[in-house]
Amino acid sequence: MPRTKKLKIATMVTSHYPTPAPKGVIYAPMDIAIELTEGLSAKGHKIDFFGSKGTKVPGANRIIDCGLEPLLGKKGQKILEGYGSQNIERGKIFGLWDQHVIARMFQEAKKRKYDLLHIHPIDRALPIAAACPDIKVAYTIHDPIFPWRADIFKMMQTPNQKFISISKSQRKPAPNLNYLGTVYNGIKLDEFKYSGSGGTDLLFVGRITPEKGVAEAVEAAVKAKHKLTIIGPASPSEYWDKNIKPHIGKEVTHINYVPRKSLSKYYRQAKAVLFPIRWEEPFGLVMTEAMACGTPVIGFRRGSVPEVIKDGKTGFIVDDVNGMVDAIKKIDLISRAACRKHVEDNFSTKKMVEEYEKAFLRFVK
């Protein structure tokens, strides 16, 4: 059997925070990048990780911080206060910070001859990559492809740039991009322990924003007469004050922050996780984390949900709050063991790393 080519890869996620993210920050692309670096390094590939000061990634061949203070650290806040008092100025600074790191990656690529660059903030790299046709660049698309993104991606794509989608549904707004493949996000199975029993209460995990459907989760739980725990950072807003805050009490509990590695306990104790998404969700790690713990998921039929949940087997896919209420009433029909098996077969970190490795090897062939 021929030996697998060992790749030399440069990667970056953000310069706004050091990697891993500080306490209180939930940023899924960073978790994926760390796990991918660890996994590919274990397979013998060399990964140089670019970021801001304080970045420490297990398995990385080199950490290159480019001398940058993270913008959302103490020193970075002073930079923003000094130069970015207006929102438009803050946006420019955030963009330029990332572009400084990305430019450094291309400079290093010309000297060190990486096989490819793997960049997560696509919007900030496209123009630079288009001007460097001899350097191969792979992007992971973490967000929905909004219409403006679809147009700009098409306008700026060149043969040396390839896109990796994290679900098939994510491609619908731009089906003809230079896709390298679809790779589902993976999770470390040992960090999400299985429970065959579960509990009696419902759970919602995610940002407290309209597109995540927190208000719909509350409404469904109230109608189904089940207690609900909400885990996610909340800040004063019209949405929070009007739709969520009035329900906080005996029946609805809110926890502002739980480290990702500690979420497993809450998933295991839940009867079901509610995922009433109101946008075209690109993937949804919450679904796979919950199912890995044996907890079924009830999700709205949007974005990646039909690809991640096996309807009637690992949860239910519904169209509205009333459908969610009906699904809650029959959730005991779902096998918790089947939920765990589904994640083991399709959404482990091991499988994700293998699929990225295959994609990258196709690219550099």
Image (tube, grey):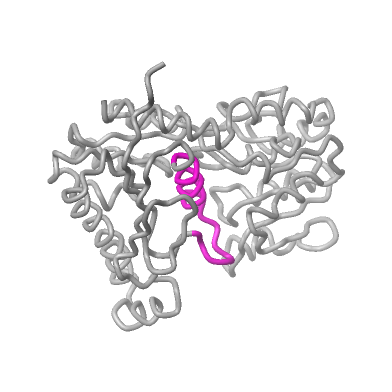
Q: Residue 93's x, y, as percent?
A: 29, 68
Question: Exactly how many numbered labels are in the figure?
Answer: 0
User: Which residue is more in the foreground, 68 or 130?
Assistant: 68
Of the 4 image quadrants, the one containing the N terminus is top left
Q: Residue 215's x, y, as percent?
A: 65, 51
Q: Residue 261's x, y, as percent?
A: 66, 53
Q: Which of the 4 quarters of the picture holds residue 359?
A: top left
- Type of secondary structure dominating the magenta stretch: helix
User: Considering only vertical position in the picture, is 246 above or below 27?
Assistant: below
User: Considering only vertical position in the picture, is 91 above or below 211?
Assistant: below
Residue 280 visible, this orientation: no
Residue 213 visible, this orientation: yes
User: Considering only vertical position in the picture, is 130 above or below 301?
Assistant: below
Identify the residue at image location x=63%, y=29%: 309
- Image: magenta residue range: 20-40
Q: Residue 29's x, y, as percent?
A: 46, 49
| Magenta stretch contains residue 291 | no
Of the 4 image quadrants, the one containing the C terminus is top left
Identify the residue at image location x=19%, y=45%: 129
Q: Which of the 4 quarters of the picture holds residue 306?
A: top right
User: Which residue is more in the foreground, 136 or 342?
Assistant: 136
Q: Is residue 27 left or right of residue 322?
A: left
Q: Residue furthest top?
A: 1
| Magenta stretch contains residue 36 | yes
User: Which residue is more in the foreground, 125 or 280?
Assistant: 125
Q: Is residue 138 left or right of residue 170?
A: left
Q: Is residue 225 left or right of residue 37?
A: right
